[in-house]
Amino acid sequence: MSELFDATEAAAILVARRVEGIQGERLPTSCRPKDLEQALAVQAAVTEYWCEQMDDTIGGWKCLLPPEGKLVVGPIYTRTIDSVPPVSLWPKPGQANIARIEPELAFFFGKDLPARAEPYTPAEVDAAIARTHMALELINGRYLDPTQCEFAEMLADGLVNQGLFIGPQIDSSSAAAASSFTITFKCANGELIERQGQHPNTHPRAPLYWLAEFLRSRGQGIVAGQAVITGSYAGVIEVPMNTDIQIDYAGLGSMQVSFSARTEVV
């Protein structure tokens, strides 16, 4: 059934919502993905539509080691990657003063890992990594009620990604071993948030090795300059808009950031 699935209708709907920063009902049953392959077909069509419409490219990826029966992977578009505060993003639906973020590490690749016949070894992937940065995934989805959606629908939509904030560079060897650390958010309005960060796959580079193989197996690859995030250390964190925030990753580094509500497309 998957090979007969037409992903273009679903992609057009999701791209329109992504451009306008809005949510809508579940996709029509006629174009709603029913399995992982259909979801990936929609995701690829979204990328094609978005990049054509926005003159954009894939600037990075999000991924995790796949849980049973699932795939956690999605592109992050170059125009949605920022490194200079204030960061403009779509706020939490219905709460214009709240930004949703996930604390992550971003691994930047200095070499291409193109499609090829033979598998990539972890050592080859490690050798292609140029540097590591603190990062925040910017969260926003395109469904009104994600709890009513099947996983394939969420995968098709890029797993609630709306972009990425790149923080300062940190020591790569320390980051590679950073399975857990305390994360503190100090907001200028007096709000203090502290979490005990834990990487969902323990080894923060493990998903990179999986991603290189996943893309290779599909005739794709990682491109030099792309940034890959490999899982939130503390789930989704809600922070105030229009407030300076200092974020500390204990033993790794700290960054300053603030967020403002987007009012128009990138």
Image (cartoon, rainbow, N blue to C red):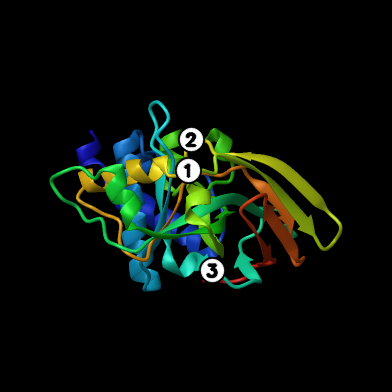
Q: Amino acid at mark 3?
A: Asp
Disc 1 to disc 2: CB gap under 8 Å: yes
Q: Residue at x 46, y 33 (%)?
A: 150
Mark 3–mark 2 distance (CA, rounded to whole Å) = 26 Å
Left or right: where 111 falls relative to 188? left
Question: Residue 82 bears which disc, if any?
Answer: 3
The tally of labels here is 3
Q: Quadrant of residue 189?
A: bottom right
Q: Residue at x 58, y 46 (%)?
A: 144
Indicate the position of residue 133 as horizontal and vertical percent values: 52, 59
Mark 1 neighbour density, 10 Å: few (under 14) some (14–19) many (20 or more): many
Task: Find disc 2 in the rendering and name its residue.
Answer: 201
Q: Amino acid at mark 1?
A: Pro
Q: Quadrant of residue 137?
A: bottom right
Task: Find disc 1 in the rendering and name its residue.
Answer: 204
Q: Is residue 36 above or below residue 101?
A: above
Sequence-first disc among 3 and 2: 3
Sequence-first disc among 3 and 1: 3
Query: Which mark is in front, 3 or 1?
Result: 1
Kind of element beneath mark 1: loop
